[in-house]
Image (cartoon, rainbow, N blue to C red):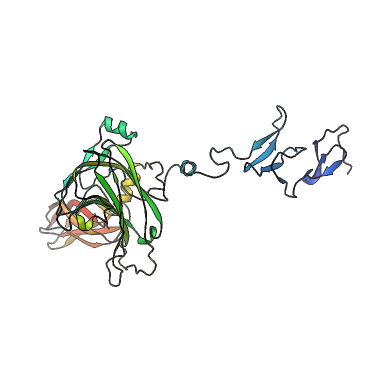
């Protein structure tokens, strides 16, 4: 077929033919394809190519930006940046990436805002599970802790309306050998952090300026036969200013090359926040020393890298399901008709989420009709069978209560 080229072309005009073939008028002739550049149509140069051809691509080799020649029909064609996402012209920043992923998935700590409190809100003394997933360890020290509501003025100081609860500790340190006060969380799978740089961050307010908070890592390889012994890394510390402020510490976890992980499935890396330490623990604690005073914590975060990025807010139901993999409370109710005594009657109870492993189970708040003591078993990571034996017949029998399930690391 004959090609009908325009009779009075201007330099840079493009004529589109069949099968996607185009010709460009270079001022003297119609040239097949682009006037310049490689066959794929991307022109790499320090300045815009001339003549400029609509729909062509130009990569600015100086500015590092890709442009497309665009004509919207409302004026002269222009070179338009091929990407208009703020911050991504040359390289993605951490803030840009957080926004693109809806600011989720960076924080490796559970119950970071202390909103999940299946065990209550305290107070607690030495060596206690407190707010879900957080353990309070104290040796010789007479320190205590509790969950405290955060006031409007504290929220304003933190700068986040999501702040509802603080983990508060009354530090009463001792100089006796082995003394310590620690808030810790164990993260499952020791390999997760092995050999990596991490940053732990938090908001806190203290009763006085100068109270030091240390951070260190402890790698546990489990407790089954053949598992390597735990490895504790020396920590670092920062001094508080008294008023609410955000702090961060960057650490590097040791490699686990040559280590043996146990078969019990409870290997972990613990983040230890030190609040007081006698001389023999002070290097591990990052030099916090023996301390007394009061500290409130909120907004705990642990992430890969050497920068504390914006705090990741997670909805309560997400935090609750994370915590229920380690500790859960479930209701039990079962009603039967029996014609004989000493007959086991019961029901299978399924857990809210699959737990990390088979939990220990305790039946509490038991109430029953025509039955003896309630028993829990067998137990798996997803369910437990709860039963009791009948004590009267014929007639109705019933068991009800709660089962506490613990699989904490």
From the top left corner, tell me how far across and down residue 391 is, in percent.
10, 59
Q: Is residue 69 left or right of residue 272?
A: right
Total numbered labels placed on residues in the image = 0
Question: Which residue is drawn at the image coordinates 85% and 41% (left, top)?
Answer: 30
Q: Please say whether residue 86 is visible from this viewpoint.
A: yes
Q: Please say whether residue 333 is visible from this viewpoint.
A: no
**Which residue occupies the foreground of this view, 354 or 300?**
300
Furthest-top residue in this view: 74
Question: Quadrant location of the C terminus?
Answer: bottom left
Furthest-bottom residue in this view: 226
**Which residue occupies the foreground of this view, 126 or 114?**
126
Question: Which residue is drawn at the image coordinates 49% and 41% (left, top)?
Answer: 96
From the top left corner, tell me how far across and down residue 261 is, in percent.
34, 67
Asked if residue 148 is positioned above or below residue 222 in the image, the reply reads above
From the top left corner, tell me how far across and down residue 304 is, in percent.
41, 51
Q: Quadrant of residue 268?
A: bottom left
Q: Quadrant of residue 54?
A: top right
Q: Is residue 3 left or right of residue 101?
A: right
Asked if residue 165 is positioned above or below residue 192 in the image, the reply reads above
From the top left corner, tell me how far across and down residue 376 is, in percent.
20, 60
Question: Quadrant location of the N terminus?
Answer: top right
**Which residue occupies the foreground of this view, 6 or 90?**
90
């Amino acid at each position: 077929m004959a090609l009908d080229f325009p009779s009075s072309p201007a330099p840079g005009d493009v004529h589109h033919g069949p099968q996607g073939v185009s010709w460009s008028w270079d001022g003297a002739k119609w040239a097949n394809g682009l006037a310049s550049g490689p066959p794929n149509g991307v022109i790499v140069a320090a300045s815009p190519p001339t003549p400029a051809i609509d729909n062509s691509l130009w990569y600015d080799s100086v500015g590092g930006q890709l442009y497309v020649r665009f004509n919207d029909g409302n004026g002269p064609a222009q070179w338009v940046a091929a990407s208009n996402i703020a911050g991504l012209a040359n390289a993605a920043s951490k803030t840009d990436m957080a926004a693109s992923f809806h600011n989720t998935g960076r924080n490796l700590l559970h119950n970071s805002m202390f909103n999940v409190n299946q065990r209550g809100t305290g107070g607690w003394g030495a060596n206690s599970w407190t707010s879900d997933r957080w353990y309070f360890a104290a040796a010789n020290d007479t320190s205590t802790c509790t969950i405290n509501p955060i006031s409007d003025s504290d929220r304003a100081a933190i700068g986040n309306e999501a702040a509802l609860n603080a983990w508060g500790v009354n530090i009463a340190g001792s100089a006796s050998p082995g003394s310590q006060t620690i808030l810790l969380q164990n993260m499952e799978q020791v390999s997760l952090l092995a050999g990596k740089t991490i940053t732990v961050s938090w908001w806190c307010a203290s009763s006085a300026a100068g109270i030091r908070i240390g951070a260190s890592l402890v790698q546990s390889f489990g407790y089954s036969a053949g598992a390597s012994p735990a490895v504790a890394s020396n920590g670092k510390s920062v001094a508080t200013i008294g008023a609410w402020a955000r702090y961060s510490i960057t650490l590097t976890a040791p490699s686990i090359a040559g280590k043996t992980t146990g078969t019990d499935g409870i290997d972990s890396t613990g983040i230890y926040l030190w609040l007081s330490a006698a001389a023999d623990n002070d290097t591990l604690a990052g030099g916090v020393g023996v301390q007394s005073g009061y500290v409130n914590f909120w907004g705990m975060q642990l992430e890969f890298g050497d920068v504390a990025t914006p705090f990741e807010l997670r909805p309560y139901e997400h935090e609750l399901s994370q915590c229920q993999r380690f500790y859960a409370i479930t209701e039990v109710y079962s009603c039967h008709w029996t014609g004989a005594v000493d007959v086991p009657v019961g029901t299978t109870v399924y857990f809210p989420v699959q737990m990390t492993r088979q939990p220990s189970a305790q039946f509490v708040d038991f109430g029953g009709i025509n039955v003896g003591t309630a028993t829990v078993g067998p137990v798996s990571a997803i369910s437990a069978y709860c039963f009791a034996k009948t004590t009267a017949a014929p007639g109705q029998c019933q068991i009800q209560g709660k089962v506490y399930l613990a699989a904490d690391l």
